Image (tube, helix red, strand yellow):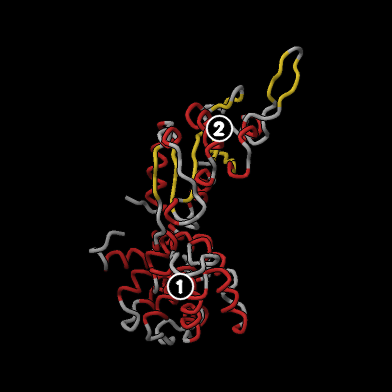
Amino acid sequence: MTETIKTAKEICRVYMKKGIPTYTEGPPGVGKSEMWQQIADEEMMGFIDVRLAQMDPVDLRGLPKHKGDLTVWARPDFWPVEERDGERGIILFDELGDCGKAMQSAAYQPILNGRVGPHILPKGWYRAAAGNSQKHRAGAQAMSTALANRFAHIEIEADVDCFREYGHKIGMNHLILGFIKFRPNLLHSMEGASLKAFPSPRSWHKASLVCDAPVELRYKLVRGCVGEGAAGEFEAFMKTMDLPDIEEILADPKKCRMPDQPAHKYALSAMLAQYATRSNIDKVMTYIRREQFGRDFEICTVLDASKRDSSLTETKAFTEFANRNQDLTL
């Protein structure tokens, strides 16, 4: 069974409260590592990312030095200390799936006991790990049963709704969000001869930074992020696009032009969800309530907008929308 980023976060929080180390696994680019950073930010705790695949086993213990007639180990700088990093936090052992047997063996003690030799993690610091799965040809190694048994395991997959919700929150380009809503199967795909560039939540995020480039460069820039096939479909999507801008809509929401094609309505819905505010929500609602827009697109717009900005649910326009759509779970 696989989880989305949203449901995985709920499960991880329970494991965190119980002090059970968690390993999140999945294909490249779905946000496994970013999820732990988000949890740390949401819980207002520290976060340290340790890339085990870039280390040797001895790096976890540190350098030996003399202390009188004893040899002691200098603490590596990446281990958290309360005075510097805070009482609570997450230490993420990232790229664990790419590590060889020696490095995996070195990780036994910190994962299970929260210490390496003399170095002890602060009690408030939670141990988590992330890695790519072997089946996705991402360089992952087989994990030893001794290490695997120290974790609770969660397998994560890409999810369109999670991607769009996150995209709206961080201001990702609405054309990318609209296209993925229209073609959800292209959110993550590793099919094809070349896997240097392929569509994933991570690569679409990169594409959103360049998709408004001049038309003569746009396809090449997007292709470099998501691969030839996905970029070609996005380019075809863009070439037929002719949307009103937000100023046109707010100036005359009752008569402003409206696209006919469903693909274009997805993009328009994503744009309106990003630009809806408490001050213009009445006009946005007037526009999307028009029969030509369609109830499904109206609902999609309102739900996306309210997830991005929860204060919109306190407006009269949203209350009227909720009353009209009492059959929905909002």
Can residue 50 be seen here? The reply is yes
Q: Residue at x 48, y 75 (%)?
A: 229
266 shown above or below 127: below
Q: Position of residue 121 (x, y in %)?
A: 56, 28
The numbered mark, 1 or 2, whose residue comes first in the sequence reads: 2
The secondary structure type at the circle numbered 2 is helix
Which quadrant of the structure image shows residue 59? top right
Q: Position of residue 296 (x, y in %)?
A: 31, 73
Residue that numbered label 2 is attached to: 106
Q: Tag 1, which secondary structure?
A: helix
Q: Amino acid at mark 1?
A: Leu
Is 133 placed above or below 164 here? above
Estimate how packed mark 1 is, as few (under 14), some (14 to 19) or many (20 or more) residues with alpha carbons within 10 Å. many
Residue 292 image offset from top left, x and y in percent: 33, 84
Q: Are marks 1 and 2 in contact (CB under 8 Å)?
A: no
Three-letter code for the amino acid on which mark 2 is drawn: Ala
Q: Looking at the rendered structure, which numbered label has been put on residue 214?
A: none
Q: CA distance from mark 1 to mark 2?
A: 51 Å
Depth check, front residue: 233 or 84: 233
- Position of 244 compared to 295: left or right? right
Image mark for residue 272: 1
